[in-house]
Image (cartoon, rainbow, N blue to C red):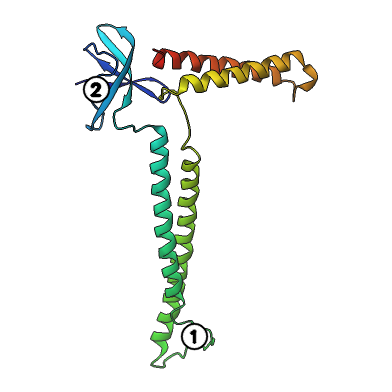
Amino acid sequence: MDKYKKYCANVFVIESDNKYASGEVIEVETKYGKINEVIIFKMVLESNGKYYYSQIRADGFNIQERARLKSERYESWASSASEKSDQAYKASNKHSDFLSLGEPIKVGHHSENRHRKMIEDSNRNMGKCVSLSDKAAGHERKSEYWKSRENDINLSMPESIEYFEHKLEEAKYKHLFFKNNPDKREHSYSLTYAKNAVNDFQKKYDTAAKLWDI
């Protein structure tokens, strides 16, 4: 069966013994044994009797959908942890009316064990409350991170041609501006960094064109 092959960062192409036309839908097995339906976009390379194709998932799944699902998953976990934290807080206050009186433990009295258990339960549940609250906050931070990436575009997407073309034009303009206006440079490496950005986006645009330009 055809398989995935890493082409560059974030991009997997299809390695096959077969010739396919653009638009054909084929099945590809992942290294975990899962079968995905993918749409052939174009052939990007032929080497040693193998054909390599750029592809998109037939179900539309991409990095943006992955980010959305991860954000929703962490948000759900945050909500669950927060709810459990509230429950633990309420449990820690179950005997607050009595404990707030500050009554000393009456050693040897029939109430001693019950009094100690109240304190232990309260402390244990308050510890759970704090721990779960911290966990909820951690999940919420991760949810916000993945939510911020729901509009990311990288080389695995056909839209990357227009995106990196735009970023390349921006980088060229900035480089030219610093080149013609030395007094506007933010520091001594501004021109160097601007040129590096041009080179980086040029490379990404060229790769995007190889993968997605028809």
Q: Residue at x 72, y 17 (%)?
A: 177
* Image disc number at residue 97: 1
In screen coordinates, is 136 left or right of 181? left
Q: Position of residue 209 (x, y in %)?
A: 44, 14
Looking at numbered disc 1 in the image, what kind of residue is underneath it?
Asp
In the displayed structure, 189 sits above or below 107; it is: above
Which quarter of the rendered picture does the N terminus lie within?
top left
Q: CA distance from mark 2 to mark 1?
A: 68 Å
Instruction: Give the labeled residue for mark 2.
Output: 25
Q: Position of residue 89 (x, y in %)?
A: 46, 71
The one nearer the camera, 27 or 21, is: 21
The one nearer the camera, 89 or 45, is: 45
Residue 27 found in image quarter: top left
In screen coordinates, is 170 left or right of 63? right
Q: Earlier in the sequence, mark 2 or mark 1?
A: 2
Q: Position of residue 4 (x, y in %)?
A: 29, 22
Q: What kind of element bears circle 1?
A: helix
Looking at numbered disc 2 in the image, what kind of residue is underneath it?
Val
* Image disc number at residue 51: none
In the displayed structure, 131 sits above or below 118; it is: above
